[in-house]
Amino acid sequence: MSFVSVRDVFQFYDGRPILERVNLEVEEGEFISIVGASGCGKSTFLRMLLAQETPTRGSITVDGNPPAVEPGLERGVVFQRYSTFPHLNVRDNIVAGESFRRPWGRFWGAEKKAARDRADETLARIGLDHVADNYPATLSGGMQQRLAIGQALVARPRILLLDEPFGALDPGTRLSMHDFLSELRDETGMTVFMVTHDLEEGFKLGDRVIVFDKPRWDPHDPSAYGATITYDFDARNGGFPYQTIKEETHVLRPN
Ligand SMILES: Nc1ncnc2c1ncn2[C@@H]1O[C@H](COP(=O)(O)OP(=O)(O)OP(=O)(O)O)[C@@H](O)[C@H]1O
């Protein structure tokens, strides 16, 4: 069985289909980029992987079990929402991120000093070392996002869920965050699901790029049908020339 297995998943809100018959098999360590039109259910899909929502029908398993409700060590999941701790300075926000992966939580004494030194190395990698002693509220929006991403990444979860994490960053910062994410992923072998609206970014970072779309469309009732995975591109080795179209396995056929 695959590490993450999504079988015949449907999600309805108020009787309205959002996702229909979604199937996906992901091996541990794969990086899955998720693209699709606005409102087609990409974030809903991430929330189901995070067990914040249960599918109306179908099943999702992570390592053979339903996804953990509480993100923990075994099935560590971090959802990127640009949230940092306002009462901790920038350095200690990174230390807090790393402590998420320890069963006993916070660092003390010499360990704390070592954790702060590691945090300073991380801050240098994401270009925030000069504001290590500042509080998040004093940073620009882009810097706060970088901090939140750094905090999520140093927790080194087994699965990392990212919902448009780089959307608001300027192009230079975006590139350095790409490098940071790629390096950490190589170091940890974590499995990543990343929603992005930037196709180039999706192909650059992802091993696969999956597309959510509505294969059935009623012009008189746009919400009559839900979206599913219509394409599953192999993005390794440069992407497009090696694309694999799996339309046959995913597209719904009218009965
Ligand atoms: N809790 C909810 N209750 C009812 N409807 C919801 C709920 N969450 C999302 N929706 C609806 O489900 C649809 C899919 O939303 P979702 O946020 O998953 O899309 P998305 O593909 O991530 O969109 P975007 O790219 O704009 O972020 C939308 O029409 C949204 O209004």
Image (spheres, grey):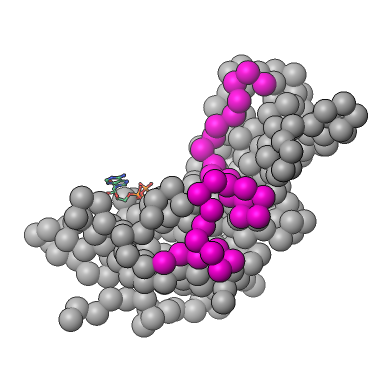
Asked if residue 64 is among those painted magenta in the image, a careful observer would answer yes
Furthest-right residue in view?
Answer: 110
Q: Is residue 206 left or right of residue 58?
A: right
Q: Position of residue 175 (x, y in %)?
A: 64, 46
Furthest-left residue in view?
Answer: 220
Q: Is residue 127 left or right of residue 254?
A: right
Q: Main secondary structure of the magenta part?
A: loop
Quadrant of the rendering where the N terminus is positioned: bottom right
Asked if residue 140 is among those painted magenta in the image, a careful observer would answer no
Instruction: Write the residue at 19% across / 55% down.
Output: 15
Instruction: Write the residue at 34% across / 50% down.
Output: 38
Q: Position of residue 187 (x, y in %)?
A: 77, 56
Q: Quadrant of residue 55?
A: bottom left
Q: Is residue 27 left or right of residue 39?
A: right
Task: Report the number of numbered marks.
Answer: 0
Name the one closer to the observer, 108 or 238: 108
Name the one closer to the observer, 32 or 20: 20
Q: Quadrant of residue 122?
A: top right
Name the one closer to the observer, 89 or 217: 89
Instruction: Write the residue at 41% across / 67% down.
Output: 59
Say if residue 108 shows up in the picture: yes
- Residue segment shown in magenta: 59-88
Instruction: Write the residue at 82% across / 28% down.
Output: 108
Q: Position of residue 188 (x, y in %)?
A: 74, 56
Say if residue 197 shows up in the picture: no
Q: Quadrant of residue 101?
A: top right
In this rendering, the answer to whether 232 lies above or below 36 is below
Quadrant of the rendering where the C terminus is positioned: bottom left
Q: Position of residue 87 (x, y in %)?
A: 63, 18
